[in-house]
Image (cartoon, rainbow, N blue to C red):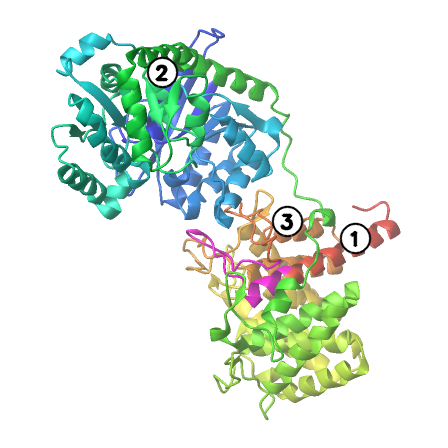
Amino acid sequence: MKIAYIGTYPPRECGIGTFTRNLYNSMVTNNETTGDSREGFIVAMNDHELTYDYPEEVKLTIGQEHQRDYLSAARFINLSGADLCILEHEFGIYGGQNGVYILPLLHRLEIPLIVTLHTIIRNPSYDQRAVLVEICKMAKKLVVMSHKAIELLTTVYDIDKRKIVYIEHGVPDIQFNRQNSRKEFNLQNKKVLLTFGFISRNKGIETVLKALPKVITKYPEVLYIILGKTHPNVLRYSGEEYRIYLQQIVKKLDLSKHVFFLNEFLNQKELFKYLSASDIYITPYLNEDQITSGTLSYAIGAGSAVVSTPYWHATELLADGRGKLFNFNDSDNLSAILLELFDNPDVISAMRHKAFEYGKKITWPKTGGKYIAVAQKVIADKPVVYAKKETNLDPLILPPFSLVHITHLTDDTGIIQHAKFGIPNLKEGYCLDDNSRALLMVLMAYRQKKDMLALELAPIYLSYIHYMQNKDGTFRNFLSFNRSFLDEVGSEDSFGRTIWALGYLIANAPNDSYFQTGRFIFSAAAGNFGKLNSIRGIANTMIGISYYLRSNPSDDSMAETLRNLTYKLIRHYDENRSSDWKWFEALLAYDNGILPLALLLSAEIFKDDKITETALESMDFLTEHTIKDGYLSVIGNEKWYRKDGERSVYAQQPIDALAMVLMYHQAFHLTKDQEYLNKLFACFMWFLGENDLRMSLFDFETKGCCDGFESYGVNRNQGAESSLAYLIAHLTVLQAFEESEKYVDKNPGKS
């Protein structure tokens, strides 16, 4: 059995790193349980551009904020011959927003995954929950170190309890003679209190300092040792502020002879010497939300008498007389307990004995043995891996269609273009692009679902379009919240999107009033069709004309306009095409799928081989660069993808995923090839988490869609463009499913 471990690792000074090393040693060298041959290696996390002199078992490192390192690590692990991967998860050690960068790595693993969860948050943010849930989905087993963790995973995160394994935090199998240790540190005549670990404000050390004066009055030989460096993240952003604050308390309370700061990160042997030399070990943490404490486990393993605040792990680990609890931030309560213990040394001895006996059950060899048993079962249960197939169209997994978020964004003027999270951002006003998209979406919703709310919203968006049209048939784009025009003429993109919506309206008008209004605005704009130069403006307009011609097939003049625009687009293609670059310009930029889509629609009308060949060839080129491993990887808008350059992964936007959905839908119409429906559905699943970050863009609470994802993670704003893109894609999936069912019924021998 060969195991890959991902986590921090010594000499990086980190509690997770110490855990990873102990786990690695206990599993790879532990033959106590099975005696079988085991080997492993470490993929170590580096922080903030720092590098370390790692031991030989570290075969690869990942820069915390270097996205490509994560993908390289996935390839390395897959090619390493490892049978299993074990991830140590803590939010702070992986890059991106709430550690989101780890998701693409885990998704690409071709071997089973076990995850040790060191932190589980009771009230997670949206992103924290989304990241952890996605990790849990990909893991075969989740190892937790407290029963409270199981409760949180099953109730807060809806994780199947059968996936969770309880294995207590391991402790080094190290023992020192108490008297020898006290003599070595010259502590023979002291009553020693000890706290160790990284120093930060949540450790509550000030509570102990404020408790000391009452204790010292009766026991002047008390010495409180605060052992540990300031936490690296605290040091990076706040310096030694907290340590200085503690030192000021020491001075104010005249405790300088009774408090000793040892600002070091000790190895385990030295640490256990201090634990054996102490009389009482204290963890005075400030709140209960801690499911695991390695320092507390070490204290129990060393047989220390422990006094602690009642955070979750302490409540469990110190049960049955293995320690005593005092209230959070309650120095008086702590003073009383310390005096009681010093007054009754037999009680301290009994606590030590119970802790020592319990600690023998959780030494690392035993803990490693439990991990080995879990690993063996996971590997034995590994399913047969068949060649990957793309997802089949399945509308049953779609969230219910909802216009809730769209109604929140819409007022009597139109749809607000931006949102702060799920709340309309009135400062940004309205735009033609989004009101045109909104009109298209509600018309589709009414046509497919007879949704009366959609029909009620339609006049608002159509009125906005009419209001923004200039006398020459062009359109303004932007309108402030107080209804002031913000431009004279909008972009060709916005013009084309409006023609698209109007063309769809003319072809699918719910009544004559809509039809007549749509035709009036469309006709007024038609004189500008031939003036278009932007390839996306041309493509959007072609789509609108194609819909128009479905209900007006005898309009030869408009058909000729479509043909002219089609060949205008094809000329761009021919000018930029080469043997390895089959595209309309020298870069793949934004909204790419609408370019082949426009040609596919035109090809359906004209039955022209040149149009069809260009449409399919450009679509295949786009597919080659965006569909991988069965999921959509949108060209990032950060730097796009220039010919002979490097493609950008971030920022990916929903309109690009929508364009791909629509493109494959029309490809199916034209060719009747079911494979395009599989690709359509794969592209739609980009919204629901089948993407590079493995994060859902759809917000199940607001029913809106996030604005894409950046290098740091999901952009949680839920503007009109993104939410409309999701809803149009959703409706397209439903329509495609109905069409595919009818096609299969009529052609039972084809698939």
Frontmost residue, 596 versus 56: 56
Element type where label 2 sits in the image: helix
Residue marked by disc 2: 301
Which residue type does callout 1 highlight?
Ser
- The spot of residue 392 in percent (x, y) is 71, 45
Q: Is residue 744 above or below residue 199?
A: below
Disc 1 packing (10 Å; few <14; some 14–19; many ≥20): many
Which residue type does callout 2 highlight?
Gly
Residue marked by disc 3: 682
Q: Nearer the viewer, mark 3 or mark 2?
A: 2
Q: Quadrant of residue 507?
A: bottom right
Q: Which residues are magenta?
A: 703-726
Disc 1 to disc 2, C-alpha distance = 63 Å
Q: Is residue 174 above or below residue 448?
A: above
Closer to the chain start, of discs 3 and 1, is: 3
Image marks 3 and 2: residues in contact by CB distance under 8 Å: no
| Residue at left offset 47%, top offset 36% | 120
- The spot of residue 605 in percent (x, y) is 74, 70
Frontmost residue, 314 versus 240: 314
Q: Is residue 247 visible?
A: yes
Residue 238 left/right relative to 430: left
Disc 3 to disc 2, C-alpha distance = 51 Å
| Residue at left offset 56%, top offset 40% | 156
| Residue at left offset 27%, top offset 31% | 13
Q: Which mark is residue 740?
A: 1
704 falls in the magenta region: yes
Which residue type does callout 3 highlight?
Ala
Disc 3 packing (10 Å; few <14; some 14–19; many ≥20): many
498 falls in the magenta region: no
Q: Is residue 22 above or below residue 422?
A: above
Element type where label 1 sits in the image: helix
